[in-house]
Amino acid sequence: MSERNRLIEITLDQGSLAPASPNAEHERRIALFDLKESNSFAVVGEDRGPYALTLAVAEGRLEFAVSDAADAPVCAHHFSMAALRKTLKDYALICESYHAAIRTAAPSQIEAIDMGRRGLHNDAAEMLIEALANKFTLDLETARRLFTLVVALHTRS
């Protein structure tokens, strides 16, 4: 990971967030912490990193507002969430199943649901990488964590 091609700060627009369940809040905090610890993020055509990223949702669009370490704007990219809507819905359903299973299901059932959840999460991260490829370059782990944050923002929209 290049010292320049990384995120040093990630902020979620508080106006875009709905109150979250304890499980969702925990996932959000972990994703933010993990992203700050390790990520690979570059802005195509720019070499002004490291970067700060603010994620927001407005009018059904996901906004990536990127600035440099001195807080000077680098770019803003608006991404239609329509391409992710079905995946977001499926992911929410499988997460509900997983959290319900933890309370009552056999370990083998929990593991099967969790494998499906992780697979869908990976698929969504790959979709995010592909959809953002003309603006940003990110690795799979960074995209996975960003998808977790997109889920947190989508809850309200």
Image (cartoon, grey):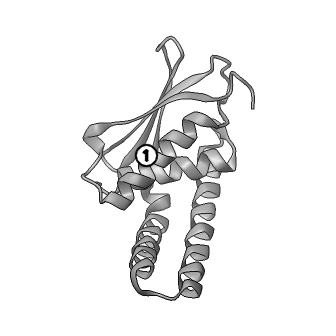
- Residue 151 pos. (x, y %): 42, 56
Q: Quadrant of the C terminus?
A: bottom left
Which residue appears at 42% of the width and 49% of the height?
A: 28
Which residue appears at 46% of the width and 76% of the height?
A: 98
Residue 39 seen anywhere in this rendered image of the structure: yes
Specify the farthest residue to the right: 1
Q: Amino acid at mark 1?
A: Arg
- Residue 148 pos. (x, y %): 48, 53
Does 54 sit above or below residue 138? Answer: above
Which residue appears at 29% of the width and 43% of the height?
A: 16
Q: Quadrant of the N terminus?
A: top right
In terms of secondary structure, where does tag 1 sit? Answer: helix
Does 102 sit above or below residue 135? Answer: below
Does 146 sit above or below residue 120? Answer: above
- Residue 47 pos. (x, y %): 68, 18
Does 148 sit above or below residue 46? Answer: below
Q: Residues within 10 Å of mark 1 (few under 14, many from 20)?
A: few
In screen coordinates, is 111 left or right of 14?
right
In screen coordinates, is 12 left or right of 18?
right
- Residue 54 pos. (x, y %): 43, 32
Q: How many marks?
A: 1
Residue 81: quadrant of the picture: bottom left
- For mark 1, what is the residue? 29
Residue 150 seen anywhere in this rendered image of the structure: no
Residue 155: quadrant of the picture: bottom left
In this view of the protein, which residue sits in the foreground, 135 or 6? 6
